[in-house]
Amino acid sequence: MLKLLTPDLHVESVFELNLEKLKENDIKGLIIDIDNTLVSWEIKHATEKIKAWLLGLRKEGFGICLVSNNTKDRVAVFNEELKLPAIHRALKPRIGAFKKAMKTIGTTAENTAVIGDQIFTDVLGGNRMGLFTVLVVPIVGKEFWWTTFMRKIERYVLRIILKDNKGDI
């Protein structure tokens, strides 16, 4: 079970993600969470820095699909200017949204990565699909009460994972 909760890569933020490492792993498509991965939960629109980062990913040749457990309105407002493929109410860690995202961007499990801030949604769902999983440290900000509760459990699990992997994930 611990293997399903262990990300392939753990980074401080999306800006520290090594795109060359992804390319070395033959990653062509990125499934990216929004809340507390790209912006804090209460920020409605993509920041200029996030817009530039996402455009940079496209210039590097990555297919991108935003996948969020949040509402249609939340995802639509965030994605207004970006106009990226996006899936709302994804029900992660269930695999349906991951499959739909890969179909949308034309990738397979072998060449797709999922980037998110939660072990029990993004990492678990991605690992269940055999995707390359990237866990980012959550952006500080207001969170849904359930997420706040789950973060406590995630911190405990992450300590075990980092200890078992000697901090090398």
Image (cartoon, helix red, strand yellow):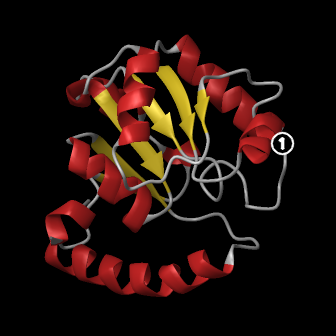
For label 1, the crowd category at 10 Å Cα-Cα, with few meaning under 14, some 14 to 19 and many 20 or more, is: some
Image quarter (top left, top right, bottom left or bottom right) of the C terminus:
bottom left
Tell me if residue 53 can be seen.
yes
- Taking the spot 58% from the left edge, 47% from the top edge, the residue there is 68
Image height check: is 72 above or below 167?
A: above
Hey, what amino acid is under mark 1?
His
Using the rendered view, name the quadrant where residue 22 is placed: top left
Residue closer to the observer: 17 or 119: 119
Q: Residue 163: x and y, percent? A: 21, 80
Residue closer to the observer: 56 or 110: 110
Image height check: is 169 above or below 47?
A: below
| Count of numbered tags | 1
Image quarter (top left, top right, bottom left or bottom right) of the N terminus:
bottom left
Give SS at disc 1: loop
Image height check: is 156 above or below 143?
A: below
Q: Residue 81: x and y, percent? A: 82, 24
- Taking the spot 36% from the left edge, 87% from the top edge, the residue there is 156
- Taking the spot 46% from the left edge, 42% from the top edge, the residue there is 17
Left or right of 54: which side holds 101? left
Image height check: is 102 above or below 10?
A: above
- Per the image, the residue denoted by label 1 is 45
Q: Residue 30: x and y, percent? A: 44, 31
- Taking the spot 82% from the left edge, 28% from the top edge, the residue there is 80
Tell me if residue 168 can be seen.
no
Q: Residue 5: x and y, percent? A: 26, 65
Left or right of 53: which side holds 91? left
